[in-house]
Amino acid sequence: MSPVKKLALATGNPGKLREYRELLEPAGFEIVPVEIEVEETGATYAENATLKANAAFAATGLPSLGDDSGVEVDALGGFPGLRSARLGPTQEERTGTLLEMLAGVERPWKARFTCTIALAETGKPVRTVEGERRGEIVPEWRGEAGFGYDPIFLVPEAGKTFGEMDPDEKPRWSHRGAAIKALLESGWLS
Ligand code: ITT
């Protein structure tokens, strides 16, 4: 068996950390969480993911991942997008704010979730991969699994919100599952 390879992950979000562990540990990686305040000043998900990956790399010297994600609602012109973490002080308030903005807008509230992962490591430029999932926002909370906006994000093909999916089911449908798969298939981690 090849030795376990350590990967740092810059995140303060326990839900994200759980998903990286679930997908990358079986592939032979140990995820070392790095909780550092990174100001998300980038103009794109890739720039923010790069800021996070670079911060974890500076702190650990390990190959390091940064993840920047967001939900984009078609009827709101892609809002909140890059600002998904800033709609309120708690996730409950963020979800409430988004639903308030949509009140009165005709359904379905089509949306997409996107996840960009940056990899920073010694001697190489930072590289990024991306995953997305299209779906729709629903007005009531469904399910308690997952984190963030999961209970209000419906995957129509699955007939469930992310909040109603088991931990091993969400990645099969999710933006993050797709991005992590792309990262594994890139060969950059070998
Ligand atoms: P970091 O420390 O990794 O930056 P964060 O929660 O600030 O954690 P983002 O800026 O990427 O991360 O998150 C944007 C928002 O979107 C935030 O409210 C997240 O909870 C939410 N979010 C991200 N991925 C999600 C997912 O898979 N399901 C539901 N909500 C998600």
Image (cartoon, rainbow, N blue to C red):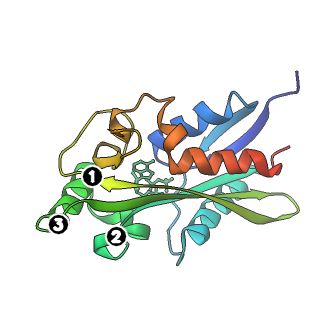
From the viewer's perspective, is the residue at label 3 or at label 1 nearer?
Answer: 3
* CA separation in Å, label 1 and label 2: 24 Å
* Residue 74, numbered label: 2
| Left or right of 92 in this view: 123 | right
**Residue 89 at what x, y percent from top left?**
27, 57
* CA separation in Å, label 3 and label 1: 27 Å
Specify which label sits upstream in the sequence, 1 or 2: 2
Asked where in the image residue 86 lies, by quadrant, the reply is bottom left
Q: Determine whether label 3 and label 2 are within 8 Å by CB.
A: no
**Residue type beneath disc 2:** Asp
**Residue 93 at what x, y percent from top left?**
21, 55
Count of numbered marks: 3
| Name of the residue lying farthest toward the top | 1
**What residue is shown with label 3?**
106
**Residue 50 at what x, y percent from top left?**
64, 65
Crowdedness near tag 2: few (<14), some (14–19) or many (≥20) residues, C-alpha within 10 Å: some
Specify which label sits upstream in the sequence, 3 or 1: 1
